[in-house]
Image: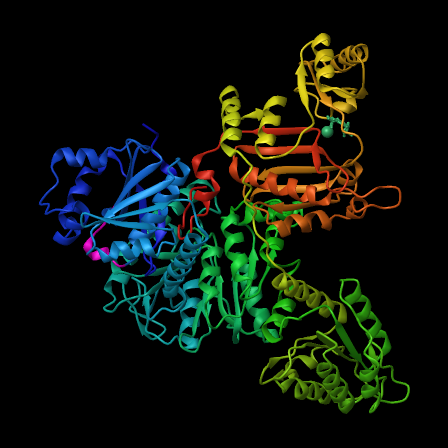
Amino acid sequence: MAAYPSEFELDVVLRDGEVVHVRPITPDDGDRLVRFFERLGPESRYYRFFRVKKNLDPEEVEYFTHVDYDRRMALIVLDGGEMVGVARFDRMDDDPRVAEVAFAVADDYQGRGIGTELLQLLTAYARLHGVDKFRAFVLPENVQMMRLFRNSGYELTRTLDDGIFEVDFPVAYTDDARAAAEEREKRAVAASILPLFFPRSIAVIGASNRPDSLGGRLFVNLLREGFTGPLYPVNPNSQVVNSVRAYPSVLDIPDPVDLAFVVVPAPAVLDVVTECADKGVRGVVVITAGFSETGPDGVEMERKLLDLVRSSGMRMVGPNCMGLVNTSPAVRMNGTFAPYYPPAGNVAMSSQSGALGVAILEYACNTGLGISQFISVGNKADVSGNDLLLAWEDDPQTDVILLYLESFGNPRKFARIARRIARKKPIAAVKAGRTGAGRRAASSHTGALASMDVAVDALFHQSGVIRTDTLEELFAVATLLANQPIPKGRRVGIITNSGGPGILAADALESRGLELPEPSPALQARLKERLAEEASVRNPVDMIASGGPEHYRHVLAEMIASDEFDAVMVIYVPVSPGGGRQVAEAICDVCADDGHDVTVMAVFMESETGRDLLRTEHGAIPSFTFPERAAEALARVVRYGEWLRRDPGRVPAFDDIDPDRARTVVESALARMGDDGGWLEPDEVAAVLEAFGLRLPASEVARDPDEAAEIARRIGGPVVVKVVSASAVHKSDVGGVVLGVEGDEAVRRAFATVTAAVPDADGTLIQEMVPGGQEVIVGMTEDPNFGPLVGFGLGGVFVEVLEDIAFRLTPLTDVDAAEMVRSIKGYRLLEGYRTTPPCDVDAAEEVLLRISAMAEELVEIEEMDLNPVKLLAPGEGARVVDARIKVRPVEPAWVPEIRDLPGVTNPRK
Ligand code: ADP
Ligand code: MG
């Protein structure tokens, strides 16, 4: 009997956006099971049992509710505490890697995707427990069940025998099954978020006549912007709030309520939200603070609140948030207590900080950045940043997604989702907490734990998220993305009426890796036609101070039409009163012609005048006051464009690896260690690495000088003698390594030397000497939030002093690995430089990919250093000459597959 697998207690979002609870069956579920069976219609019973079945007898109830979670397993679905579905498997007696599966869903719950979700979870369970194949018996008339299997993405074989279909399929995740699960997840989550952003009616619980209270401000905001549905203030102490009839409780409202804002004191929140559940409200926004951000009592109260929300199938924003906004004319919901309502537009934004949220709305109002939806997520107890990404993925009003983040709930899921969405619409983010001090501030502020910055950089880089350092940069990038095409390349043209700013712009662009090609002779000739003699038609094109609106019009049009530039920066320095206005009009005229895809941006070096003028019917031309800011934003967007065009690569599958063997080694090591785990022994390290196809020089542990000599003879040639010691992290630093030892006597002497170097010598490692090659470091460390991070750098000072090291999160694609190796400054040495011969760079990439595979398979590995790996001459591969691996026991819920099950909203932390 295996332990009850609590990691499979999960909340799942269904097709229609409702949330249900799934968990393994327990012996206490007998009554529930009987009630469930009694609810099943005759047809459902027949499909399940292949015969007319009137009732479950006590032995059957006992049998179905008592499973051992290994040979027999069952997951049940609960809604409001009642059982509404079940899926089970029983392994075959003659072949335990094959299991027979069966499903049943309450009649009134059919058609909502419950069976499909159960199949997904049961296959995940099976995969993790050594079941390879599922078998189901289905009556031909049970078309629903056949469809469920067919749409699952698994590769089915179907045979008809005696009037019953036998359906067989391997449970290994296929790309199709993943894609199907992700598609379902997207739809389900978007449907669950819909009542939050597109409510048909709103209650404000805690609405008040006091204009200074949050409830008063929020209600007035909703009223003033003209929310398109009915608004219901709820306040037990007043009959009327702002001329609108008020109700003592949400339960007294005569009509249905989609969305409720909760602005009551913290101790009253649970009662109020319970009433919302009873009323059938679909979404709640809890503005009230005083939850997990305040300490243990608050954490407990937030947990209760979440349980309540989940068990009633609602979704919740907050608590401790500022609210949400939808500018769509069909909704017009100004659901925050801030005094700003942004202009409508195509940028969706989520903020983890309420106070910054206010600043963001103010900024959007002032700069005219158009917002589609805005949300302040607060403590993110239920609705997370990942949910919002899924909701915005297919939102037709949203073209650009902005995130202000302080922490990640589920980074692995973020990576998976962001990577897909960023291919359709850009995501830009500021992640607070870049420095140590900022990090402490973030965690005391929202009660959320911030994480290592390299992990965040890797996460954003790998998933195509544009990272900015400040909110100001975020808005600059957003303005560019919201209004202009993404540049097709790095070629930038500059137009200016003054030399100095042109040079500043050129420097700013070039230092960020952008290119300023000289116009072709033909283009130069065309530009010259209408410019003054002294004008320069190289790049920057300097029209000098006499350059007027007509010159701007001519040059810009020619540069756009030339196909020689991917972006054009138009700089104007005021020379005559009102000149800026005319130049702005000229730029707009040229850009109003929709037939081009060149990115155009303006720098008007006079405060604020350019901005409002630079609007065309095809969107605005982003306008900046200084060229550096413009260059910065452009560079970030160009890099995003390059990410878009780059092949994402694939995570290679190695067919020569033996994860089971490595797992056995790790498990037996863990059995010897305590709860904190520890470092593997040298022979265990070698076994694990070899199981993943990594090559080590021949090596063996010797306990005494004679044994050392014997091993050295067997290995042949010069050897390396290293002390085996738990205390010495850098053996050579203390004289614990002797290289190039040859001959019995020398080996014995080396044995004595190295074992004398440390107090806790436990024999020596006699290793084949690997001559030549270049030394690199490959490391892996498990970030508590982000999962395994793989690092790559050159050995010694390069990593330690120059910090020249690249990190990526697993799983690595082949493209990630290639990019990692090339991204360090020391790469030029690996290619061969002066007296340093080139080495096997392909082998370095392969080592990284194999280590990534190992980290994904063996979650027990907490840390690993391969230092050094010797890269031999091209074609000769790599040898791991020194390695340390630290392992520790891992909770089942920490397994990546469970942490990121599509559609599941609460994998346990
Ligand atoms: P530590 O890192 O604990 O000091 P290593 O096993 O990494 O000990 O050995 C130190 C250095 O000795 C390595 O960085 C490498 O330069 C060299 N070395 C170690 N083992 C070998 C080997 N088998 N062949 C060639 N050189 C080696
Ligand atoms: Mg070493």
Between 603 and 66, the one lying in front of the other is 66
Can residue 472 be seen here? The reply is no
Tell me the colour scheme of the image.
rainbow
What is the x, y in percent for residue 134?
A: 33, 43
Q: Residue at x 74, y 48 (%)?
A: 824
Q: How many marks?
A: 0
Residue at x 66% of width, y 66% of height: 637
Residue 903 shows in the view: yes
Locate residue 444: give its quadrant.
top right
Point out residue 384 in the picture as x, y percentages from the top left corner.
46, 54
The answer to whether 613 is drawn above or below residue 89 in the figure is below
In the image, residue 605 lies in the stretch drawn in magenta: no
86 relative position to 388: left or right: left
Asked if residue 354 lies left or right of residue 562, the reply is: left
Residue found at the far right of this picture: 534
Image quarter in which the N terminus is found: top left
- Horizontal and vertical percent for residue 255? 25, 69
| Above or below, comparing residue 817 to residue 186 in the picture | above
- Residue 374 in picture, x, y percent from top left: 49, 66
Q: Residue at x 40, y 53 (%)?
A: 903
Q: Tell me which segment is drawn in magenta.
A: 103-111
Q: Quadrant for ligand 1?
A: top right
In the image: residue 555, left or right of residue 861: right
Camera-side residue of 853 and 200: 853
Q: Nearer the viewer, residue 904 or 753?
A: 753
Q: Residue 455 or 671: which is nearer the viewer?
A: 671
